[in-house]
Image (cartoon, rainbow, N blue to C red):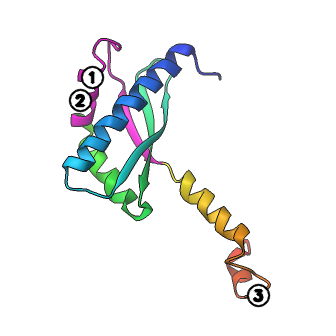
Amino acid sequence: MEESQRQKKIASVLQRDLAEVLQHAATHGGMRGVLISVSKVKVTVDLSQAKIYVSVFPNNKGPEILDGIKSNNAFIRHELAQRTKHQLRRMPQLEFFIDDSLEYIDNIEQSLKGKEDPIANPDLLDKRKKS
């Protein structure tokens, strides 16, 4: 089903404000050198829930950052409510997920560049076989 204009507008407002909140928390929380971006926000039809996809660089910090975000969900939701109080009547429940699309694209790119050439290294074929 197609997203309504209202869903898209709320998603973009949440995405912009949430990116600011998370980046501010990362820089002032002692996590220098970590880049957090909100890649996608999906809001349900009844506007009660928002699925937020977060991209973290470097990739190995992703699960740690996601755990921190989930444990501070109430604080983040309150901070967002303060920023969007003139635009949203009710703040949706927030669900956070890691967006690993950049890592997936990087893996495809590395494969296409030939770093893992199965002809030169036949042992790689065992990894690629489907069970």
Secondary-structure class at tag 2: helix
Quadrant of the image occupied by residue 93: top left
- What's the distance in space between the residues labelled 1 and 3, CA to CA? 56 Å
Dot 1 amino acid type? Arg
Please name the residue shown 64% across and 22% down the image. 2
Label disc, if present, on residue 120 of the rendered structure: 3
Kind of residue indicated by mark 3: Ala
Q: Is disc 3 surrounded by few (<14), some (14 to 19) or many (20+) residues within 10 Å?
A: few
Was residue 89 drawn as part of the magenta stretch in this picture?
yes
Q: Is residue 80 magenta?
A: yes
The disc label shown at residue 83, or none = 1
Q: Position of residue 48 (x, y in %)?
A: 40, 22
- Please provide the residue range marked out in magenta: 75-98
Which residue: 44% across, 61% down? 59
How far apart, in angstroms, are the residues tagged by discs 2 and 1? 6 Å
| Above-or-below relation of 24 to 67 | above
Name above or below for residue 27 compared with residue 33.
Answer: above
Percent position (x, y) of residue 22?
A: 31, 41
56 above or below 24?
A: below
- Residue at the location (49% across, 24% down)? 44
Examine the image and state in which quarter residue 58 appears. bottom left
Q: Is residue 97 visible?
A: yes
Instruction: Please state which of residues 75 and 105 is positioned toward the viewer in this rendering.
Output: 105
What is the number of the mark on residue 79? 2
Q: Nearer the viewer, residue 70 or 131?
A: 70
> At 39% across and 38% down in the image, what residue appears?
95
Is residue 6 found left or right of 2 in the rendered image?
Answer: left
- Please name the amino acid that badge 2 sits on: Glu
